[in-house]
Structures are given as structure tokens and as C-alpha cells.
Image (spheres, rainbow, N blue to C red):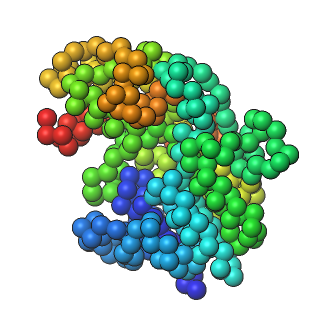
Amino acid sequence: MKANRKFSTGATGLIGGDYLHLISKKHREWNIAALVRDPFKANILQEVYPSVEIIPGDLDDADVLEAESEKADVILNFANCDHLPAAEAIIRGASKRKTPCYVLHTSGAKIIAWEMESQPQTWGEYIPHPYDDWDGVRKLTDVPTSKSTPGSVLPDWAAHRDVDLAILHGHHNHRGIVRTAIICPPTVYGPSRFPFFTRSIQLPRMLNVFLRRRRAFTIKGNKNVWNMIHTQDISEMYVLLTEAAVDQRPGNLWDEYGYYFSEHGEFVWGDVICEAARLGYEKGLFDSPEPEALTNGQVSQFWFGGQMNVSSTSLGSAQRASKLLGWKPKSRNIFEDIERTLDAEAKLLGV
């Protein structure tokens, strides 16, 4: 086995790319291997970060994932949080090691919006069900059993939960060898410092739909609330966790306690939509400075299901990383990034 080897998926993506930028400056002593499917991106990555070992492949290459995971002391899964076979391959590889392997897996805060997700008639309303990763961490990491009571654990069918469970089962089935930490980002905004175009999901996709319609819209005024985090703040959390893994730091950092919300404040989606509408109209991209009030059924005709990501409420208080790792996100907010993101989506659409 190679000592001091870090294996990353999603290294050319938004968060993974920014993480690579940070560790290339802070931890040049680490050996990094990155799974990359796009030869063009692989060439860019190799040019900018020549010390990174490129592993050609994608998340469907289970044998590659398993083999590379077996070689690594730390695995960072930044890629698709809904790709169950990839997560299972990573755990299989990690479990073959003779020494501990730390698996840092990226989930998503849609997982704690499960109640509203299952009730489309509530989309756009504010129905809070707050979670936290300190006192309430076992609600997030406990594996359901026949003795579990309603509300004591997340339901198996919640978004991303099947993959989270695959990671958690890795710890339960291979104690002392597979050590896990699940990082759960909310709405991510802000640019990555990776030298290639990257984008997040919720805000860009919503703005893309607005641009194609030439008008913003709301559902029930979008009073729903999400937490937010800047790309460059969450990548700092990954660096802190990797450092703790390299040190094999003890304490309630891993496994049944290893669940990390990564937020710095909250926002109302309706406020973001109104600001986007104002900016889009000023730039001549929208036909009205006011969002159009639509029903969920009307939106489903042109954005089926996508509206749930901006019409539910997801609140997960990030306490663990601050208390145990000294994580300190900077004071900034999503409203500072709306114009940049709108311009980027307009450029992609050629408008």
C-alpha cells in the first residue's frame, strides 16, 4: 500500500476543484490521485497541478474505484451524491486495507427536506423542521432498525439517503478500518478557484430556467428557507477534515458522530428570486422586474420536479466542524453572487 495517498472523485468540479487549489498550496507533501473522465479536463488538471496523478475513469468504473480506494488512506468523494454503486465500490476498496482508511463523502441538504419533498402541495411554503449536527447527530447517522421510532432517524427514502447509508454501513461492517465522515452542503454559491468553469446546482439551474422564459417566477411567493455556504468556505472544511484524518485524530469526528452540516446563515428563496428578477430586467434579459406568480402545476409543465430544489425548506445547523475543527466560514451571502451567476448562465445560453 502507498502511504499518505489521497484519492479524490469530482476533483475537477466546484468543491473538489477548490479543495485541490487549497491543498496544492498548503499540503504539497500529500500524494493526490484524482479520478477524471474528461481528457480535456485531465490535461488542464495535469498542467496546473503536475504532482496530481490522473486516474482515467468515471463513477461507473467500479473496479477502478475499488482498486484506488484500497490504496488510499483518505478518500474524498466529491462527485455525484446519488451514485450508489460508486459509493459501494469505494467502501469495498477501503475495507480491504490493513490500516484505517478515512472516507469523506459529500451528501446534500435535500436529505433533510424529505417531509416537504413528499408533499408537493407544500412547495413554496415555510415549514421548518430544523436539524443540527451536534445534539441531533444520531438522527442523521443511525441506521434504521425494527426498533427505530418515527422521527428518530431519517427515512430510507429521503434524497441521497441510500448513498449515505452505504457509507455508514461501511463503518458498521468494518469497524476500525473504514472511518467515515459525511459532509452535507446546503445551497452552495460562489466561484471555485479551480482553473476551469464550474457551477453549483440550485441557483444556476433556476436562473437558467428564468432566462429561457425571460421572466422569473415564484410558487406561493417562495417563503421557504435554506441554509447557504460559499464554495471556498466548504472546501476549507474538507481540508480541516483531511488534516484530522491524516493525523488519525481521535474524538467524535468520525463514524456515528461524523456528520457535518456546512452552512453559514440562511436565506429566503423568494428574496433571491426577486433580486434575480430585478437584475435580469435591468440587464435586458427579462421582460419584467417582477416574478410571475405560478402554481406548482404550471411550473411542472416546463421544469418537472426541478422546482422542489428551490421550493422546499432545508435547515441544518453546522456546529460540529466549528467546535471540533475550528472551522470559521467568512461572512458573506448568496445575494452577492446572484449577478455573477446570472451573467454566467446568460453566457452559456448565448443571450
Q: Is residue 233 left or right of residue 340?
A: right
Residue 60, position as x, y percentages in the image? 44, 67
Q: Residue at x 80, y 50 (%)?
A: 145
Residue 30, position as x, y percentages in the image? 49, 74
Q: Is residue 339 visible?
A: no
| Number of on-image labels | 0
Q: Quadrant of residue 342?
A: top left
Q: Residue at x 53, y 45 (%)?
A: 108
Vertical placement of residue 79 versus 219, above or below: below
Q: Quadrant of residue 28?
A: bottom left
Vertical placement of residue 266 versus 61, above or below: above
The furthest residue to the right: 147
Instruction: Give 337 or 182, whichever is nearer the viewer.
Output: 182
Q: Is residue 116 visible?
A: yes
Q: Quadrant of residue 337?
A: top left
Q: Is residue 128 left or right of residue 230?
A: right
Q: Residue at x 36, y 75 (%)?
A: 56
Q: Residue at x 68, y 58 (%)?
A: 168
Looking at the rendering, in which quadrant would you find the N terminus? bottom right
Residue 269, position as x, y percentages in the image? 44, 24
Vertical placement of residue 340 versus 256, above or below: above
Residue 84, position as x, y percentages in the image? 55, 59
Looking at the rendering, in which quadrant would you find the C terminus? top left
